[in-house]
Image (tube, helix red, strand yellow):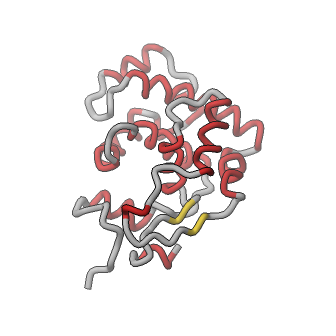
Amino acid sequence: MEQKRCHWPGKNSLMIAYHDNEWGVPLHDDKKLFEYLILDAFQAGLNWEIIINKRENFKKAFHNFAPDKIAKYTQKDIQRLLNNKGIIRNKLKIQSTVTNAQKFLEVKKEFGSFDKYIWQFTNHKTIKNKFKSLKELPAKTKESDAMSLDLKKRGFKFVGSTICYAFMQAAGMTNDHLVNCFRYKEL
């Protein structure tokens, strides 16, 4: 018998694996948090399925999401990425990835970890919602508004409140699995 899950993964095996194993799991690993921040920025204006289908290509293209390497990217690296058909070839998003890597390292230095910084927006706890349908899920919240505002002040790019909320969902800062989804109770 198949377990009941949120409807958004559809029948895509990568989406199902992401939903079942990653989405909404409280995340405290800086490297993984950086990956989610980058992928959510690339998702802006697109759907998550496009990103998840290209995730491995992104991983290879962006040195396994190593912020210390990405922070040092030159125009030659940006051109290499713009020529990479396996990723989203948006110049502003690619350039913002370099900027965000630099800012990520600054935050990490200031707070000791990006994890300590980013989880402050939910008081270092997962917000447990009780949504029954996808229509109930907000596009943003007061927490994502505060996160977005602070990230922008620090010089991050592509960190609007909607992107921040998607990041919060992915990183388990909020449990937005529907209450009838098997993952809701597990998390």
x, y percentage for residue 102?
Answer: 61, 28
Taking 54 as reference, is 75 left or right? Answer: right
Extreme residue in the bottom direction: 1
Q: Position of residue 162 (x, y in %)?
A: 48, 44
**Measured along the vertical axis of the image, is residue 33 above or below residue 66?**
below
Q: Residue at x 36, y 45 (%)?
A: 55
Residue 152 versus residue 59: which sits nearer the camera?
152
**Residue 33 percent location from the top left of the image:** 56, 48
Q: Is residue 78 above or below residue 86?
A: above
Instruction: Please identify the residue farthest to the top as the structure is shown.
Output: 75
Residue at 34%, 44% (x, y): give it. 51
Q: Hey, which residue is sitting farthest left in the picture? A: 11
In the displayed structure image, the side of residue 139 where residue 111 appears, left or right: right
- Residue at 37 percent across and 63 percent down: it is 134
- The x and y percentages for residue 26 are 57, 62
Give the number of marks: 0
Q: Is residue 11 above or below residue 115?
A: below
User: Is 133 on the left or on the right of 117, as rendered?
Assistant: left
